[in-house]
Image (spheres, rainbow, N blue to C red):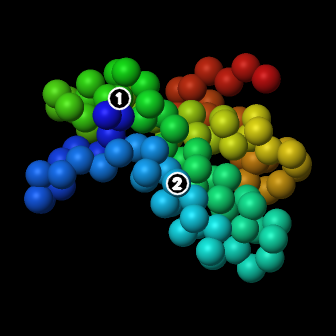
């Protein structure tokens, strides 16, 4: 199973796919109109996509220094790349954010 987090206080793991889907639905519920709902759902769906990396899964399962395996930039890039309107404010900052995070953006 691909996990989203280390085990919780009850010793349970949280499946990454379920985490992303539930986050997407919760995020969409905060949208004030259809465009915001779609944007929020997309952001929620992609926000932890970098956790699918083998290195990140190893970090979660075996431990390591917090922040040693970046994951956030992957979701930002996915959100930007798969947006139907790359002029939306969230997407206009993605390349800069990714560069600051050390992610090599090709686009």
For this rendering, which residue is in front, 24 or 36? 24
Q: Residue furthest bottom?
A: 32
The residue wearing badge 2 is 21
- Could you tell me residue 79's position as x and y percent? 69, 43
Is disc 2 surrounded by few (<14), some (14 to 19) or many (20+) residues within 10 Å?
Answer: some
Q: Is residue 44 left or right of residue 51?
A: right
In the rendered image, is residue 46 in sight? yes
The mark lying in front, picked from 1 and 2, is 2
Q: CA distance from mark 1 to mark 2?
A: 19 Å
For this rendering, which residue is in front, 89 or 63? 63
For this rendering, which residue is in front, 14 or 61? 14
Q: Residue at x 81, y 71 (%)?
A: 34
Q: Is residue 67 left or right of residue 75?
A: left
The residue wearing badge 1 is 56
Residue 84 vertical placement versus 62 (above, below): below
- Could you tell me residue 60's position as x and y percent? 25, 35
Q: Is residue 22 left or right of residue 91?
A: left
- Secondary element at image label 2: helix
| Count of marks placed on residues | 2
- Could you tell me residue 100's position as x and y percent? 57, 35
In the rendered image, is residue 73 in sight? no
Q: Residue at x 73, y 54 (%)?
A: 90
- Check the picture and name the quadrant holding the N terminus: top left
- Could you tell me residue 47's position as x and y percent? 54, 48
- Check the picture and name the quadrant holding the C terminus: top right
């Amino acid at each position: 199973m691909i996990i989203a987090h280390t085990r919780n206080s009850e010793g349970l793991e949280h499946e990454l796919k379920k985490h992303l889907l539930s986050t997407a639905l919760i995020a969409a519920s905060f949208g004030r109109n259809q465009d915001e709902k779609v944007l929020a759902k997309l952001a929620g769906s992609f926000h932890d996509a970098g956790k699918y990396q083998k290195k990140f899964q190893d970090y979660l399962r075996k431990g390591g220094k917090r922040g040693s395996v970046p994951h956030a930039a992957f979701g930002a890039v996915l959100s930007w790349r798969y947006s139907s309107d790359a002029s939306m404010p969230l997407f206009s900052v993605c390349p800069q954010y990714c560069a600051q995070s050390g992610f090599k953006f090709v686009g």
